[in-house]
Amino acid sequence: MNDRLNFDIAALKAGDRSEFARLVEETSPKIYRLLLKMLGDEADAEDALQDAYLKALRSLPNFEERSSLSTWLYRIAVNEALMQIRKRKPQVALGEDNGDDSEDVPAPVELADFCCLPESELMSGEGKQQLNRAVQTLSPPLRAVFLLRDVEDLSVRETADALGVSEQVVKTRLLRARLKLRDELSAYWSERVAAQKVEGE
């Protein structure tokens, strides 16, 4: 999603409903995909999507254009997802694990060697399901950074703008997310590598 779709910002801010309808139509598929991966539940993602666009509609007159429209929408969507998570599990803190983004990143216990697996194996339906399950094990802040940066392909700066954090925090959280995902998936991929070797003998 990007602003090359040439939305009429002035019309949106003035309350033009047809332009807003076009905004929803052209941006909602990616916003929904992000929310579904953040929340892991279709009903929750649909609720968050509706709330996000209602909030965007109310907030558009005050949109200051300091970030791109797409980044602004991502920020609203992520905030809605975090609110859903807070409602679900009010005891879970939404800050980073220990509240310290400057601490050293711990190395995973085991790292599988993925070199022997073809891309088709990594991107298979089963592989994607394993990755999606692993993403759900990340804390909400790590999950948001990973999805925006590695799945939605936002830049570090755009991700920082969307989350309201510094670029260094994005880099630190992204590294943690990648290491935790690799650690989480290592057993599964190790089995796949072993299976490939057996088949090749």
Image: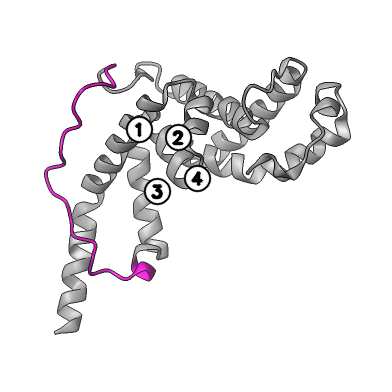
Q: Which residue is mark 1?
A: 171
Q: Secondary structure at mark 2?
A: helix
The CA distance from mark 4 to mark 3 is 17 Å
Q: Secondary structure at mark 4?
A: loop
Q: Which residue is mark 2?
A: 156
Q: Position of residue 112 (x, y in %)?
A: 18, 56
The residue that disc 3 covers is 132
Residue 65 to residue 155: above or below: above
Q: Nearer the viewer, residue 5 or 32?
A: 5
Mark 3 or mark 1: name the one nearer the start of the chain: 3
**Quadrant of the image containing the C terminus:** bottom left
* Lower position in the chain sequence, tag 2 or tag 3: 3
Between circles 3 and 1, the one closer to the viewer is: 1
The answer to whether mark 2 and mark 4 are in CB contact below 8 A is no
Please give the residue where the numbered disc 4 appears in the rendered image. 153
Task: Give the extent of the magenta segment.
Answer: 99-121
